[in-house]
């Protein structure tokens, strides 16, 4: 059993989180690695402590996983929802409960803020992630994601 801790991310963790995003974006082909862009996004996430959250998994003083979420207003729910955007664990540490612990910590953070629904996007070809979310009782919807730049 690994002796890791789950905690809120801090600014000194940014370089480690960029490394993790590089891993995630190698799986999710819709995104490209651009360290300055990812750094900017992470800094924005960290500067709003109440409506945004980054949780990290730390093992032997090294960040080995992360999960991000931010709160949005949903007209369908008539209240707040949380969008979980990035969940990634280093390859060597997958299958050992770290992803589950990260996701549960984000869920707890969101519930404490009165969130009515959690939602996330996952790459349709990432079967390992989809299987993981299914085991964590996440349900598919009929919605698809579209975007425009």
Image (spheres, grey):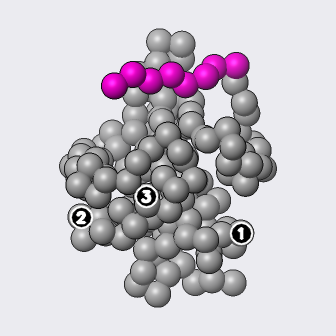
Q: Secondary structure at mark 1?
A: loop
Q: Which residue is mark 1?
A: 95
Q: Is residue 106 visible?
A: no
Where does the magenta region start and end? 142-149
The residue drawn where x is 30% and y is 43% is: 50
Horizontally, residue 41 falls left or right of residue 1, namely: left
* Residue 35, numbered label: none
Horizontally, residue 73 falls left or right of residue 44, namely: right
* Residue 21, numbered label: 3
Q: How many neighbours does mark 3 have within 10 angstroms: few (below 14), some (14-19), or many (20 or more)?
A: many
Q: Which residue is mark 2?
A: 11
The residue drawn where x is 61% and y is 41% is: 123
Q: Mark 3 or 2 closer to N-term?
A: 2
Magenta-span inclusion, residue 148: yes
Q: Secondary structure at mark 3?
A: helix
In the rendered image of this protein, does residue 116 appear above or below residue 50?
Answer: above
In the rendered image of this protein, does residue 10 appear above or below residue 145?
Answer: below
Total marks shown come to 3
* Foreground label between 3 and 1: 3
The residue drawn where x is 40% and y is 67% is: 19
Q: Mark 3 or 1 closer to N-term?
A: 3
Q: How many neighbours does mark 2 have within 10 angstroms: few (below 14), some (14-19), or many (20 or more)?
A: few
Dominant secondary structure of the residues highlighted in magenta in the image: loop
* x and y, in percent, of residue 24 in the image: 51, 56
Which part of the image, by quadrant, shows the C terminus?
top left
Horizontally, residue 128 falls left or right of residue 122, namely: right
Magenta-span inclusion, residue 22: no
Residues at marks 2 and 1, CA–CA distance in whole angstroms:
27 Å
Residues at marks 3 and 1, CA–CA distance in whole angstroms:
19 Å
């Amino acid at each position: 059993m690994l002796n890791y801790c789950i905690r809120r991310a801090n600014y000194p963790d940014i370089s480690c989180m960029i490394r993790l995003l590089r891993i995630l974006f190698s799986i999710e082909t819709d995104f490209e690695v651009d360290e300055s862009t990812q750094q900017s996004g992470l800094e924005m996430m960290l500067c709003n402590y109440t409506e945004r959250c980054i949780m990290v998994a730390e093992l032997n003083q090294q960040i080995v996983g992360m999960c991000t979420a931010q709160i949005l207003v949903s007209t369908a729910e008539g209240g707040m929802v949380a969008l979980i955007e990035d969940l990634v664990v280093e390859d060597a540490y997958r299958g050992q409960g770290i992803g589950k612990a990260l996701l549960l910590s984000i869920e707890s953070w969101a519930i404490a803020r009165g969130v009515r629904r959690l939602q996330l996007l996952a790459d349709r070809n990432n079967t390992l992630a989809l299987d993981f979310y299914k085991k964590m009782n996440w349900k598919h919807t009929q919605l698809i994601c579209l975007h425009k730049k």
